[in-house]
Image (cartoon, rainbow, N blue to C red):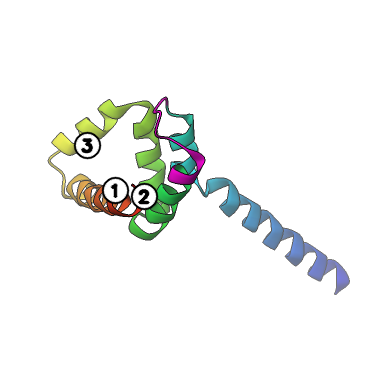
């Protein structure tokens, strides 16, 4: 029984660490950008807005756009309903971040 509990606790710890590693993708991308306005406080604020407005999958996609903005343009020009929905969520996120984090 003790071994089972130990395994369960270890599994829970690994899951928690995996979620922590995935978290703050937008913040890390923001801080890594060359933008002068990318302060720790502002990037943290933007991450908090992203946590409210975007799924983890959305955040993973959007974080890539900091390094390669052309990917955002490609998604914007896409004709699929899935890409249109992501673009709508991204625009909402951007408006919220601008209003809250400026």
Q: Are marks 1 and 2 in contact (CB under 8 Å)?
A: yes
Secondary structure at badge 1 equals: helix
Q: In this view, does 24 lie to the left or right of 79?
A: right
Crowd band around label 2 with a 10 angstrom C-alpha radius: few (<14), some (14–19), many (20+): some
Q: Is residue 2 left or right of residue 65?
A: right
| Horizontal and vertical percent position of residue 2 | 87, 71
Crowd band around label 3 with a 10 angstrom C-alpha radius: few (<14), some (14–19), many (20+): some
Secondary structure at badge 3 equals: helix
| Horizontal and vertical percent position of residue 86 | 25, 49
- Quadrant housing the N terminus: bottom right
Q: Is residue 25 left or right of residue 72?
A: right
Residue at the spot 22% in from the left edge and 37% down from the top edge: 75
Q: Is residue 15 magenta?
A: no
Q: Are marks 3 and 1 in contact (CB under 8 Å)?
A: no
Viewer-side label of 3, 2: 2
Q: Mark 2 points at which residue?
A: 101
Q: Name the residue under label 3.
A: 75
| Horizontal and vertical percent position of residue 27 | 47, 42
Residue 12 numbered tag: none
Crowd band around label 1 with a 10 angstrom C-alpha radius: few (<14), some (14–19), many (20+): few
In this rendering, is residue 64 above or below 44?
A: above
Secondary structure at badge 2 equals: helix
Magenta residues span: 34-42
In this rendering, is residue 33 above or below 59?
A: above
**CA distance separating discs 1 and 2:** 6 Å
Q: Name the residue under label 1.
A: 98
Residue at the spot 78% in from the left edge and 63% down from the top edge: 7
Residue at the spot 68% in from the left edge and 54% down from the top edge: 14
Q: Which of marks 3 and 1 is nearer the N terminus?
A: 3
């Amino acid at each position: 029984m003790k071994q089972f509990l130990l395994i369960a606790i270890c599994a829970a710890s690994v899951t928690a660490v995996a979620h922590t590693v995935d978290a703050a993708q937008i913040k890390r991308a923001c801080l890594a950008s060359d933008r002068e306005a990318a302060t720790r406080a502002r990037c943290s604020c933007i991450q908090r807005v992203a946590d409210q407005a975007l799924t983890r999958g959305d955040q993973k996609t959007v974080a890539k756009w900091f390094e390669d903005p052309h990917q955002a343009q490609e998604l914007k020009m896409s004709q699929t309903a899935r890409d249109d929905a992501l673009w709508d969520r991204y625009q909402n996120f951007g408006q919220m971040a601008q209003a809250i984090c400026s």
